[in-house]
C-alpha cells in the first residue's frame, strides 16, 4: 500500500476496518502498520479523516442462554464442552471473537 500515495477512499476504509479487527486482537498500531506496509503517520491521518471507520464494529448476535433449550436431547453437548458464545446462522462459536470476524460470517 505504501507505493500508492493516494489510494481510493474504499481501499482506505477497507484497511481501516482491517485495522479495527487487528486492534480487537490486541495488535499494536506499529505491528499493524508493519503488516500492512503503511506508515503510522499516514494511518493516523486516515483515522482522523474517517473517524467513523469502526462504527459498524458491532453486529447483532443471538446469545444462547441454555444449550438444553436449543438442542434436542440426542444432540446435547457433553458437560466438558465449552459454553456457546454465539451462533451466526448455522455456525456455533465457542470462544469470544472480534465483531469484525462475526460480521464476515453473515450471508
Image (cartoon, rainbow, N blue to C red):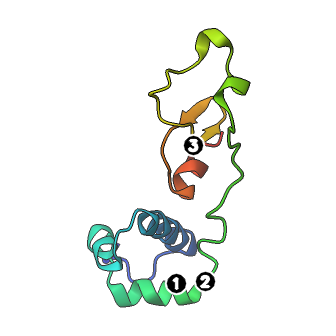
Quarter of the image containing the N terminus? bottom left
| Image position of 22 (left or right of 10) | left
Marks 3, 2: nearer the viewer:
3
Asked whether the residues under the numbered discs 1 and 2 touch, taking CB atoms below 8 Å apart as contact, a structural biologist would say: yes
Q: Position of residue 22 (x, y in %)?
A: 41, 65
Choose between 70 and 39: the one closer to the eye. Answer: 70
Quarter of the image containing the C terminus? top right
Choose between 14 and 80: the one closer to the eye. Answer: 80
Q: Is residue 103 above or below residue 48?
A: above
Q: Position of residue 5 (x, y in %)?
A: 39, 83
At mark 2, the secondary structure is loop
Q: Is residue 107 above or below residue 79?
A: below
Specify few, some or many for label 2: CA neighbours under 10 Å numbering under 14, 14-19, or 20 or more: few
Q: CA–CA distance between discs 3 and 2?
A: 30 Å
Residue drawn 33% across the image and 78% down it = 38
Specify few, some or many for label 3: CA neighbours under 10 Å numbering under 14, 14-19, or 20 or more: some
- Mark identifier at residue 24: none
| Image position of 60 (left or right of 54) | right
- Mark identifier at residue 47: 1
Residue drawn 50% across the image and 38% down it = 94
Q: CA–CA distance between discs 1 and 3?
A: 31 Å
Q: Which residue is mark 2?
A: 51
At mark 1, the secondary structure is helix
Count of numbered labels shown in the rendering: 3
Specify few, some or many for label 1: CA neighbours under 10 Å numbering under 14, 14-19, or 20 or more: some
Q: Which residue is mark 3?
A: 85
Residue drawn 64% across the image and 28% down it = 67
Asked whether the residues under the numbered discs 3 and 2 touch, taking CB atoms below 8 Å apart as contact, a structural biologist would say: no
Q: Say which label, 3 or 2, has the lower sequence index.
A: 2
Amino acid at each position: 500500500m505504501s507505493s500508492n500515495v493516494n489510494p481510493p477512499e474504499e481501499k482506505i476504509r477497507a484497511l481501516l476496518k482491517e485495522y479495527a479487527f487487528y486492534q480487537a486482537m490486541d495488535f499494536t498500531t506499529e505491528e499493524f502498520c508493519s503488516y500492512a506496509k503503511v506508515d503510522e503517520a499516514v494511518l493516523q491521518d486516515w483515522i482522523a479523516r474517517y473517524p467513523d471507520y469502526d462504527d459498524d464494529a458491532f453486529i447483532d448476535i443471538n446469545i444462547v442462554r441454555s444449550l438444553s433449550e436449543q438442542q434436542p436431547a440426542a444432540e446435547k453437548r457433553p458437560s466438558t464442552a465449552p459454553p456457546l458464545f454465539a451462533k451466526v446462522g448455522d455456525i456455533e462459536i465457542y470462544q469470544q471473537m472480534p465483531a469484525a470476524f462475526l460480521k464476515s460470517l453473515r450471508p
